[in-house]
Image (spheres, coloured by chain):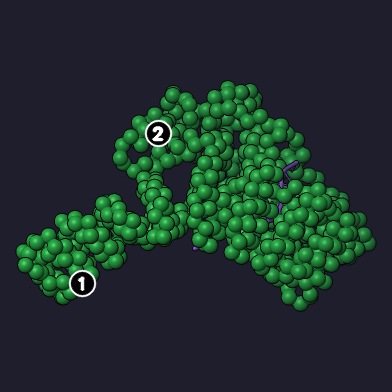
Amino acid sequence: MEEAKKAIKEVVEAKNQVQMWKFGDDKSSLLDQFERLSVDLQLNQAMLRRSLSEPMYIRSEFPLLLTQGPPEPSRPPPPPPPSPPHLVAKKRRGSGFNKVLKKMIKPILRRMSGKKKDFPIPEAKDPRFWKTFSRSKELQRIIHGPLYDAFFIPNPCTVFHSPSPPPPPSPSPFSRTQYSGKLLFLAASSSATNPTTTHQKPSKDYILQSEFENPNLGFDDTASRLQVQNFIDGIKALPLKKKEKDGCFQTVSEFNSLLMALVIAEEPDIALSLFDEISSAHWLVPDSVTFSFLLRCYCGEYDLDGARGGLIHMVENGFYPDPATFTVLVNSLCKRGKLRGLWRVGLKPTIQIYNCLLKGLCYVGRVEVAYDILMRIKKKNEVKPDIYTFSAVMDGFCKVGRSDEVMELLDEAMEIGLIPDVVSFNALFHGYCKEGRPMEGLNVSKKMKEMNCIPDCITYSSLLHGLLKWRKIRNAIRVYEEMVENGFEVEERLMNNLVRGLCRRSWKEKNILEDAHQLFKRMRSGHSGIDASTYGLMIQSLCMGKKVDEALVSLQGMVRTGYSPWIVTFNNVIQGLCVEGKVFDALLVLSIMYEGGRATSRVSHNPVIHELNRQGTFLGACSVYSAALKRGVIPNKIPKQ
DNA sequence: AGCTCTTTCA
């Protein structure tokens, strides 16, 4: 009896304490809070112990007792109530549905996390891939249930290689028909004629198909993304009431698996709504795993209030976040720079927690402090810093323009046996490019490759951007070529930047014009967009480089595709054409200007009149002159006989 | 029963 009272008191205290933790509280100093992470152990240990050992019935009795007062002294402490049916179900291990669900999710999970160790990725045509499904008796058991429709994941084999028509639409109101539609669609697009032979813009169907065929994207990756998407579609299509009625979620773990899938698929909204309804309907009692996923949903959305609410809810229910969940929580705070409100915990900080904190410190600009802490971690030797730790601090230094120190940090990391990865190098490149030393970055990238560290998209983009920014055009084009060689796609914006850089340089170095034009043509034939400014600059550069004909073609193309070139661009082309004696082409350009209702100036007319004079076409010169006058422009050149 | 932390430009 006394024990029960005590327990209740503890629960209330714990609850109050949880509410005391304020997210974003500015009162205490940063380092205070930071140190507290490690020293507050005792304060919370009692609570932690309680959380871990608390029997479930305390939790469920708790709200009742609050309103009705303490239990009558004559009654013995309440025994655990007989397990309701859903709790019995909870204990049933390896339920069929769960097993199958896991089987379906596991490969996706592993591929996504990059841990491919012991899971052989099946070839698309590999029949073994089918066997996992067909052998499973559990699948047979659920195959007629409504969930089958929701969780039916089309096998890649069917999607890509089966010539047979898809199964006929089932009478089920759920998503089978939807999938059939997809299957049909994919089958149709893979047998379609190759659209590149026609001049039509590639249709969406084709792009989709080529994505699957593109080896760089990776078949398996795309397939799993497709699977996850279908999975989500299925869940969306399935009304929750239906699920409850049919008792599809018989155990919490089934529900957790679903939550996990939703978290991975980055669909926190669905997960949260599912959680709300499931718990309010009292069909299932959420466990610690459920809460962990719940918190991750909130953190993924940066909903700090939601996270706080979830945390309180969790502790009220007698669960305590484990280090991993905790890391997610700390991280979402640090990402926002909300360092001051770090709450007290009874856990020793792991290196991951430190990493989050260091990142947060860098985010708010306290790089020096971050560095000191890194040194302290190193000296204390309680936790071993990893490459993430160094990367975080390195990134901080880069952001404040202290690249030299970043290089030193990199060396330090290597001294203690850490192998720098792409991310650490990328931070360094960023720093160098920001400081106007892109060439040093380029040199380091050579060193990086020597260390068998493979540059990624960010590496190339950063370097390319830096080189362009600081007008190292020749190096930029080399990096671009390397990038394309390695199968990376260059972003539209960067591409435009590159072409513009090349154009500008071509005014001084004539041989660059050809490179620029090649790139430009590649852009135009591909489906990446071209800025109006890039277009104009290209045309002007072509004029300056005595390639007037190509300039004219580009100008016509530009007008045809709906761009509105600057007047100078027109004038440049007119000027260029006249210099080469191609006065009729110049007249064509002039008429394009007239037709479009564009403003013309003396500069538009002067070269034409001059050239017509030179060629002795007095009448022509006169008509151009009068056309100009009609538009309120008085040319400097006068028709001469 | 699950799993955590690091990166570019615009």
Q: Is residue A8 left or right of residue A241?
A: right
Q: Residue at x 75, y 47 (%)?
A: A419
Amino acid at dot 1? Arg
Q: In which chain is the residue bearing label 1?
A: A
Q: Residue at x 12, y 60 (%)?
A: A615
Q: Point out the frontmost of discs 2 and 1.
A: 1
Residue identified by numbered label 2:
A189
Q: In which chain is the residue bearing label 2?
A: A
Along the line of sight, the residue nearer the viewer: A327 or A153: A327
Chain in green in the render: A
Of marks 2 and 1, which one's residue comes earlier in the chain?
2
Q: Is residue A486 above or below residue A603?
A: above
Along the line of sight, the residue nearer the viewer: A501 or A291: A501
Amino acid at dot 2? Ser
Residue found farthest to the right: A2
**Residue A588, percent from left and from top:** 17, 57
Element under label 1?
helix
Q: Is residue A359 left or right of residue A377?
A: left
**Residue A58, percent from left and from top:** 82, 56
Element under label 2?
helix
Chain in purple in the render: B
Q: Residue at x 85, y 58 (%)?
A: A378
Q: Is residue A71 above or below residue A274?
A: below
Discs 2 and 1 share one subunit: yes
Residue identified by numbered label 1:
A602
Can the viewer see residue A218 in this picture? yes
Q: Is residue A594 above or below residue A28?
A: above
Along the line of sight, the residue nearer the viewer: A229 or A624: A624
Q: Quadrant of residue A232?
A: top right
Along the line of sight, the residue nearer the viewer: A624 or A10: A624
The reply to whether dot 2 and dot 1 touch (C-beta < 8 Å) is no
